[in-house]
Image (tube, coloured by chain):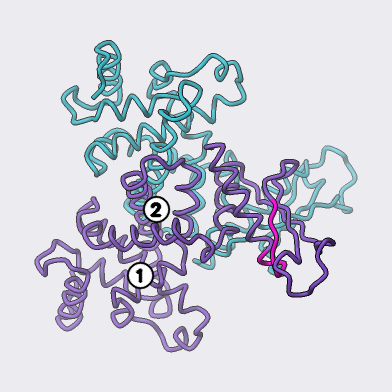
Chain colours: A cyan, B purple
Amino acid sequence: MLEDPRRQKKLKILIQKLGLPVTAPVDLSLLDLALTHPSISSTHNYEQLEFVGDSVVRLISAELLMEIYPQEPVGEFAAIRSIIVSDRILAELAESFGIEPYLLIGSNATGNPAGRQSWLADAFEAVLGALYLSTHNMDLIRPWLDQALATRAAEVLRDPARFNYKDALQEWTQRKYKILPKYQVRQNKQVELPQHENRFVAEVWLQERHLGKGYGRSKKAAEQAAAKDALLLIKANNN
Amino acid sequence: MLEDPRRQKKLKILIQKLGLPVTAPVDLSLLDLALTHPSISSTHNYEQLEFVGDSVVRLISAELLMEIYPQEPVGEFAAIRSIIVSDRILAELAESFGIEPYLLIGSNATGNPAGRQSWLADAFEAVLGALYLSTHNMDLIRPWLDQALATRAAEVLRDPARFNYKDALQEWTQRKYKILPKYQVRQNKQVELPQHENRFVAEVWLQERHLGKGYGRSKKAAEQAAAKDALLLIKANNN
């Protein structure tokens, strides 16, 4: 039981911000815990709920992708999901739903802006964990989260260049083979201008297997292009 | 709608084998799909359901570990879960629930015994996906799966040496830092007997950070011991 009436009142406002009715059967003690950063308490904090919530958002994403894009191969699902459940996107979602003001966090932690994306994403996952554990189904989550995730998934499909293909490829090789892809980058000898967009050429390998090849203005851009090439190959092979 | 009455009848027997009533609201078309290996059809097979089911078993494991071991730190949860949702354990569960006879699979695939653990685990995950999507909650799964997972989790906690610490550590570093741990193994100069149980010494690093150290009769055993040492350190630090 959450005792503090002021905290109770605040958390009920948050519930309504998510678009849920104020009478929704949310366990307020769990929601309070989900919004307690480890800097407040090393034992009574959001870490366990984050562990549950990480699985919740992955399951909802899997289900949603299967519903919206039933014809897409599973390799594509894995790639899209690895982007829409990334810290970057989850932190953006936490911001868009206005969760940050409800997070209890020590000033020593907020003083480190580099960590902000990470704890926003963690707290967002923990909130999902708390809502899931309140009813043991997705009824308190999907009504407001589905549209946000579907929008992100559509963005990834429409303009994949904005997103991180290397992460997506790594998730796929980890899941499928428990190994990481390796990149080899070299200068493209056919190009002499330093700013040329094909200045570097990258190849990505999974042990002995050549997965893809890409070009770029920088080494990083060439690696991303190679990862994209590999993901398209995986998609074409439907595995 | 699943048309074939013989297949329907068979799948209803499987439902009862899982301990569910024959009237349970299982979508038989989905269950049929979950038990169709890609060697039967490259498009109409269990792959999408496996993708969903992988998240289902992870979520159930997270929830279950939090319920049974509320005092354990999250690092320990991640280690235990990476073992109980491994292909090895999921294939064992598929066998113990007698799922294999219901799997439609081409003889070209069954001819490769090395793949058996993998497709048993995949089909088991797909069955979980089908049951989850039948009701959009865990009501058709937790009644029979919880006890099996709890038993495995207790085994891991009681006798961790039987399990694979390297996999568990790798899952943790991947999740937390998106990089893999590196092992350095050398002969232990203080030991001269070739069969001595401290013959090799392994150290495991995460970039510049020393995570753990372990000894073993073989290089492999020393690495496992180092991974275990690292997981205990992580557990002690509660992160």
Read off the magenta span: B213-221
Of the residues under marks 2 and 1, which one precedes in the sequence?
Answer: 2
Name the quadrant of the N terminus of chain B: bottom left
Which mark's residue is nearer the viewer, 2 or 1?
Answer: 1
Residue A137: x and y in percent read 24, 44
Q: Residue at x 42, y 20 (%)?
A: A103
Q: Give the side of residue B203 with respect to residue A176, left or right.
A: right
The residue singled out by tag 2 in the image is B58
Give the residue at x 35% y 65%: B126
Q: Chain of mark 1?
A: B
What kind of residue is marked 1? Leu
- The residue that disc 1 covers is B93
Magenta span includes B218? yes
Q: Is residue B178 magenta?
A: no
Q: Is residue A94 above or below residue A165?
A: above
SS of the residue under disc 2: helix
Name the amino acid type tagged 2: Arg
Q: Nearer the viewer, residue A190 or B103?
A: B103
Secondary structure category for the residue under label 1:
helix
Q: Is residue B71 above or below residue A77?
A: above
For mark 2, name the chain: B
